[in-house]
Image: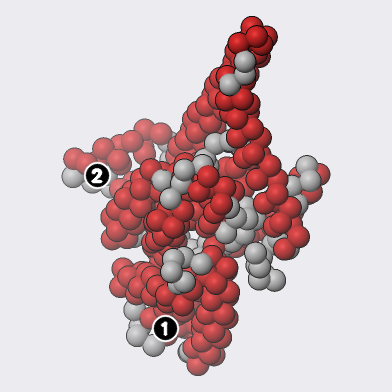
Amino acid sequence: MTISSSSPASSAQIESAQTHQIASARQVSDNENSIDEITSLSPETTGTRAEQERELRARLRRTRRHDQLRSASVTAALTLGLLALFYADLAFGHEVYSFSDITSVIAGIFDGETIPGLSFAIGELRMPRVIIGALCGIAFGMAGASFQHLLRNMMASPDIIGITTGANTAAVFGIVVLGLSDIRLSAFALLGGLATATLVIWLSWDHGPNISKLILMGIGLAAALNALTSWILIRADQWDMQTAQRWLTGSLSDAAWSQVMPITAIVVVSGLLLIALNRHADMLRFGSSMATGLGVRVAPTQIAVLLLAVILLSAATATSGPIAFVSFLAGPIAFRLCGPNKPAIGRAGLVGACLVLASDIVAQHLPQAHVPVGVVTSLIGGPILVILMIRMACTKEV
């Protein structure tokens, strides 16, 4: 498989990672085949072989229980971490609010009551930003992990197939040429991302989704759209250029309640459908032949995962801008936490939400000036990428 030079992993690294993944799958398959071979032996050797069969089945049960316990522990820890970051992002800022202040404002929202001062600071300024940050983080994380399974490279980024670039170009065109803002700008960027994804899939269609052509078409289209975005920015006036640059960096500063319902509906529906496909999508990282051998209908699964991931990525980009490194890092971190035997798309969403909220807290408390959350995710993402690459090199995964 060929990945662009902007991809963090080289072709040799991709082949090595694929070899490791296939070896892991074959190890599980060999264990199950060993049971079948043992059960087919002659009656003379049944006593010894039966003991080996019981021992092997007990070993498989212990492995499954360990994986299930580890997966449940990781999910619980990530959920608690997300709740803690959600509260911290609401409480800390120029003014620090107590737990009772926050619960009073939340109760007032449902009861229709307004608390002077607190309802505006917490309910109108902080609450939409934190909710949208968490939802966009979930969308970026799940979309990133889905694309990494499809591309069979846990270090690949979904940005390489041009969907984010399409949403960026549409947003810049909407700001500079059409003068759009708020929910209309988000809707226009969403249409740009979906139109780009449709064009890339149509150009790469070959009696079904062709992943290699998908990557190449995405790279070419992304390069053309980047050039168009630069040309629009050069012709923009100073005010529009600043607005477009802030949007391109990825920011939660313009979050509003009007954006909450659309992104909530998209994340809930698309996210639940992706979780339903979690196990089949996880098999795609072993390759089409291996996935088919494990009982997966490859083409329908690829189409469904691709469409759902495109919708999530486009919606999140249209709402907050392209927050860097979240979709790229969430998948590998979740995969490391859960282990190689459990699907990680759902956990990648939790990791993505934690990354965005933690970065937003840091962004608000940097000295001198507030910075877009995308700047902080880039500062955090770079070192984490280096650590992941070093760890994977030490374990000979790349």
Instruction: Name the residue nearer the viewer: 2 or 90.
Output: 2
Q: Quadrant of the N terminus?
A: bottom right
Q: Nearer the viewer, mark 1 or mark 2?
A: 1
Instruction: Name the residue nearer the viewer: 397 or 47.
Output: 47
Establish if 210 lies above or below 345: below
Quadrant of the rendered structure where residue 227 is? bottom right
Q: Where's residue 23, x and y in %?
A: 68, 42
Amino acid carrying mark 1 in the image: Phe
Can residue 246 be seen here? no
Task: In the rendered structure, find residue 109 and report the number of the disc placed on it.
Answer: 2
Left or right of 273 on screen, residue 348: right
Q: Residue furthest right?
A: 394
In percent of the image, x 40 and y 72: which residue is there?
A: 198
Q: How many marks?
A: 2
> Which residue carries the number 1 mark?
173
Instruction: Name the residue nearer the viewer: 98 or 172.
Output: 172
In percent of the image, x 51 and y 42: which residue is there?
A: 294
Q: Residue furthest bottom?
A: 235
Q: Secondary structure at mark 1?
A: helix
Amino acid carrying mark 2 in the image: Ile
Q: Few, some or many C-alpha atoms within 10 Å of disc 1 (few <14, some 14-19, many ≥20)?
A: many
Establish if 347 lies above or below 389: above
Establish if 74 lies above or below 254: above
In percent of the image, x 62 and y 59: which residue is there?
A: 156
**For the residues marked 1 and 2, what is the alpha-carbon distance in whole angstroms?**
36 Å
